[in-house]
Amino acid sequence: MNTAYLALERHFARIASLQDAIGLLGWDKEVMMPSGAAERRSENLAMLEGLRHEILTAPIMADLLDQAEAAPARAASAETDWQRANLTAMRRQHTRATALPQDLVEAHAQATTLCEIAWRDARQNSDFKALLPALTEVLNLTRAIAAATGEACGLSPYDALLDSFDPGTRQADIDPLFTRLRAELPALTAAALETQAALPTTRAPQGPFSLPRQEALGRELMQRMGFDTTRGRLDVSLHPFCGGATHDVRLTTRYREDDFIPAMMGILHETGHALYEMGLPDAWISQPVGQSGGMTLHESQSLIMEMQFCRSAPFTRWLAPRLRAAFGVADNAPGWDAQALHRQLTHVEPGFIRVDADEVTYPAHILARYELEKALVSGDLALKDLPAAFNERIHTLLGLRVPDDRQGCLQDIHWPAGLFGYFPCYALGAMTAAQLRQAACTQEPAILPAIEQGDFAPLLEWLRTHVHGRGSSAPLRQIVLEATGAPLDADAYLTHLRTRYVDRAPNA
Amino acid sequence: MNTAYLALERHFARIASLQDAIGLLGWDKEVMMPSGAAERRSENLAMLEGLRHEILTAPIMADLLDQAEAAPARAASAETDWQRANLTAMRRQHTRATALPQDLVEAHAQATTLCEIAWRDARQNSDFKALLPALTEVLNLTRAIAAATGEACGLSPYDALLDSFDPGTRQADIDPLFTRLRAELPALTAAALETQAALPTTRAPQGPFSLPRQEALGRELMQRMGFDTTRGRLDVSLHPFCGGATHDVRLTTRYREDDFIPAMMGILHETGHALYEMGLPDAWISQPVGQSGGMTLHESQSLIMEMQFCRSAPFTRWLAPRLRAAFGVADNAPGWDAQALHRQLTHVEPGFIRVDADEVTYPAHILARYELEKALVSGDLALKDLPAAFNERIHTLLGLRVPDDRQGCLQDIHWPAGLFGYFPCYALGAMTAAQLRQAACTQEPAILPAIEQGDFAPLLEWLRTHVHGRGSSAPLRQIVLEATGAPLDADAYLTHLRTRYVDRAPNA
């Protein structure tokens, strides 16, 4: 490859190291840091982000990118394909970083910090009016960022926001998928509830559940799934997440004594994220092309583990005796058999809170937010009208009357944090997970029987080849097409929901 | 202050943030990091060090320093005094950083990394010959660095090395102090051993000692000493240290079930380091002048706690009943009374290993190394002759015949790590601690009675004012002079050793 390209690789390797440092210090902040260090840590993290931005936007970078792109193409090979994809990813980062004036970036960072603080009180007090001034500032600055980025990238403002979380994904890709969900989910939900009502009642396991046993169980499941403990850790934090750095993935969870299911399912979910990070192409770890391919793919990897496989009947048949052993419960203890466990893991119940929603009613929460945030960014919806519009949509989509804004439009941190364009990735991730699962089980018939034995190796191997190992070498659209033979659509997802929740098929 | 100075402050604030990041990632490496992340972490730390060096040596820095120094002096005030001292510290860092060509810095870093690895095997096998090639490379590169730095700073090569650990300290300051120790310690040691032999025997507390109880005891003692748990942590690592970042001091220790004394004394020692870091001037935390004032002052702060006060008879009178309570031992249990505890904490026994040495015989280990490393740097001693020269000096100073190099010149990592000029700081720190203790107890008579009640507040207040709060605003020499009214010498230290170990005075 030409010298300009090689110089770019060196600059981006420095950027990757800064990202590792930011990731590890971010983990430390949530897991280890003493409270009095918070202000200084914020300064340090902002400085590292500033250095990253400075390296990325240094005058020499534009010249190097131009030279590397103008260099004559070399004979195609796996190596040059990756280099070309890397150059594309470099250009994308550079274009986005240089699209914005520094004062806009800083004003946005400051506004979201203040708005997040205001949001904690506003949510607590269910007081949307108290949040309105700070949220208005965040929305105005986000719209300015969307406009400037969109202009630099040739995208509409909302697409520019989407693209920052999910490179290459456009509103035009999402609309038909979400339209279909909107059309089919209400009837599907009603049918699922009807099926559920006809089932015999089961009871849930009764606690208390010892925290050390919960932790030992979580570690055992992580390792079964393929988590490499020489390249990652499990710890405790207030809000579970998957963070850290390349070759050093830091998962967190939170335990409750009265219920082991939330921590266990949280670990299975975050392990899906971790396995993706651990499977990224080793040779490219310090380059843009070696990094994960956006929020939708990331979420698809947590959901294929947590939702598609770990809540499946085959897996619960393996899991139920393991749980009885883990908590020292008799084999015939009520609520601890595979069927009762599966019922608990697939219980459907429309509710107000997105993060507590089951698989069937979850997309409704996203549809509502997607429609609203598009209208907020375009200016079609005024912020002051958000609560009424939010509640109206939840009523239409879920048949529920939101009692207060705390359980309505104030429940999520995303908008106060300036994360407009992020919500759709959750539902796209669920659809992607369903389509990948269908393709994986068809292409590799050994996967499902192995899962029923608690063996994730065949599944992980398939994911390594078709998803993890691809890094950012292609957009979501292409990765899904090549892995499954079809463009991303809602079929597999709707089929999955019907099979598991309406038909209650024995292997769903 | 002029705009050039203010611009310098901004650049150095970025450097301070990078140092914080390096400190925290260094702590994480020893305490949290999974093994498989080691290689990547080394890359990341080297990159952060490289960025730090790049900011410090950027062409604009020389211009800014020249302009700031040439600016007309403003009216003297506390503020301008600190700014002037800060500018001096900035210039010092810049001169040292620009003195060395980048390839020399990199060659030295690579040579020490390889030599440290070779040293682990060589020590294990007591095989100095196996280390000789790698150590020769390190010494040659260290001599090149000493020569180049010395030329830039107007110092002899060995002074240039000393100055890197202890700004402002020169061989000419050390020689008379060490000459005096060399003259007086042999007789003092003999007298101490004679006194000790005449004392009735006592027995040591018998284990096992529960690790959670040891940890709870350590935390209680740290907090009594003034460690702010909202600005620091205690964890476990293979080699105890005090690291972390500004406002976030990370201590580590290591517990043994058969003996609680090493972990407890280690915590007291590291807490001394931590209190110094926590007491640095808040307003200057992100500037060179706000950082700690070199290795001798740092070591003096750990030793004034561990050696001067925590092994004193008054403190052991308070500590003994606390220990019995901590481990649930009867008040009359043999070995757990204050006298037996004090005897154990002040036991004298010449030995081969520096880090295991008592207060009386410790300086001999340093005198030997100081003389040898001066001769190695000047070229008067060839490396191949080091083992014989080392053993000869240990025999002269301690009367011991070194049985093998593992217990001789291979025991310490310092020289393989390229740390020539570091050893004297340990003995200087012990002398400084003794002189500070004497001055503190004279100026503030409430200190010793408080220590006897387990109350460190009066001592800490004195140290905050006279040492911690001064940061790097003056060299060691001046800080000691202003705090104690006299230049640093060996009097207080020799008096301390005589009083405690020869006279066995009741309050020593």
Image (cartoon, coloured by chain):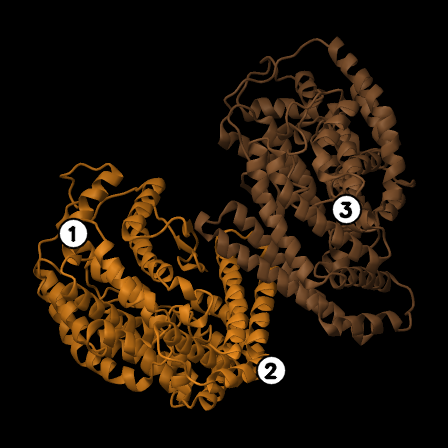
Chain colours: A brown, B orange
Residue B117 in the figure: left or right of residue A222:
left
Q: Disc 2 and disc 1: Cα gap in Å?
A: 56 Å
- Give percent across and percent down for residue B482: 24, 75
> Depth check: A408 or A15 in front?
A408
Work out which quarter of the rendered image holds the C terminus of chain A and state it. Answer: top right
Of callouts 2 and 1, the N-terminal one:
2
Kind of residue sitting beneath label 1: Glu
Q: Are marks 1 and 3 in contact (CB under 8 Å)?
A: no
| Residue A340 visible from this viewpoint | yes
Sort mark 3 into few (<14), some (14-19) or many (20+) by Cα contacts within 10 Å.
some
Q: Chain of mark 1?
A: B
Q: Which mark is residue A464?
A: 3
Q: Disc 1 and disc 3: Cα gap in Å?
A: 64 Å
> Depth check: B81 or A505 in front?
B81
Q: Disc 2 and disc 3: Cα gap in Å?
A: 47 Å
State the SS at label 3.
helix
Q: Residue at x 20, y 72 (%)?
A: B484
- Which residue lies under the disc numbered 2? B59
Q: Which mark is residue B452?
A: 1
State the SS at label 2.
helix
Q: Residue at x 51, y 68 (%)?
A: B13
- Give percent across and percent down for residue B444: 16, 62
- Give percent across and percent down for residue A345: 68, 23
Sort mark 1 into few (<14), some (14-19) or many (20+) by Cα contacts within 10 Å.
many
State the SS at label 1.
loop
Kind of residue sitting beneath label 3: Arg
Work out which quarter of the rendered image holds the N terminus of chain A and state it. Answer: bottom right
Residue B270 in the figure: left or right of residue A502:
left
> Depth check: A353 or B477 in front?
A353
> Depth check: A379 or B388 in front?
A379
Quarter assignment of residue B77: bottom left
| Residue B113 visible from this viewpoint | no
